Image (cartoon, rainbow, N blue to C red):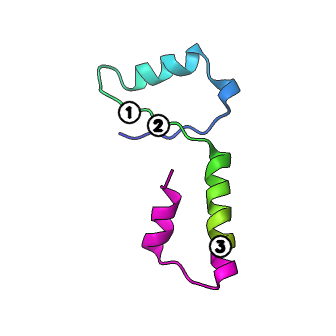
Amino acid sequence: MQVAYQLSSNELDSSFLKSVKQLFKDKNIEIVIYDEDEEDKKLGSILANSMADKTVASEKDFLKALNED
């Protein structure tokens, strides 16, 4: 099972953790947290570079660039 939560860090509280624990009772889980603003900056940079160079990025290169640190 996979569940995605989109919320502000200010909304994190013990009831959130309690609901996750209840939903995934006795399961191993992975929690990944990323900053949406940072993802938007990456996308903007990729698009700006693409327009400046007048090049077209392949879907593979585009997705690779999004996942670079």
CB under 8 Å between callouts 1 and 2?
yes
Q: Is residue 60 left or right of residue 16?
A: left
In the image as oriented, which residue stretches furthest toward the front?
53
What residue did someone put label 3 on? 49
Give the amino acid type for the residue marked by disc 1 in the picture: Glu
In the image as oriented, which residue stretches furthest toward the top?
14
How many neighbours does mark 1 have within 10 angstroms: few (below 14), some (14-19), or many (20 or more)?
A: few
Which range is magenta? 49-69
Give the amino acid type for the residue marked by disc 2 in the picture: Val
Asked if the stretch drawn in magenta spans residue 14, the answer is no
Query: Magenta residues: mostly which secondary structure?
Result: helix
Q: Secondary structure at mark 2?
A: loop
User: In this picture, is 69 found above or below 65?
Assistant: above
Residue found 62% across the figure and 58% down from its top: 42
Residue found 42% across the figure and 71% down from its top: 60
Q: Is residue 48 left or right of residue 34?
A: right
Q: Nearer the viewer, residue 2 or 51?
A: 51
Q: Secondary structure at mark 3?
A: helix
> Could you tell me how far apart the alpha carbons at marks 3 and 2 are, in whole angstroms?
28 Å
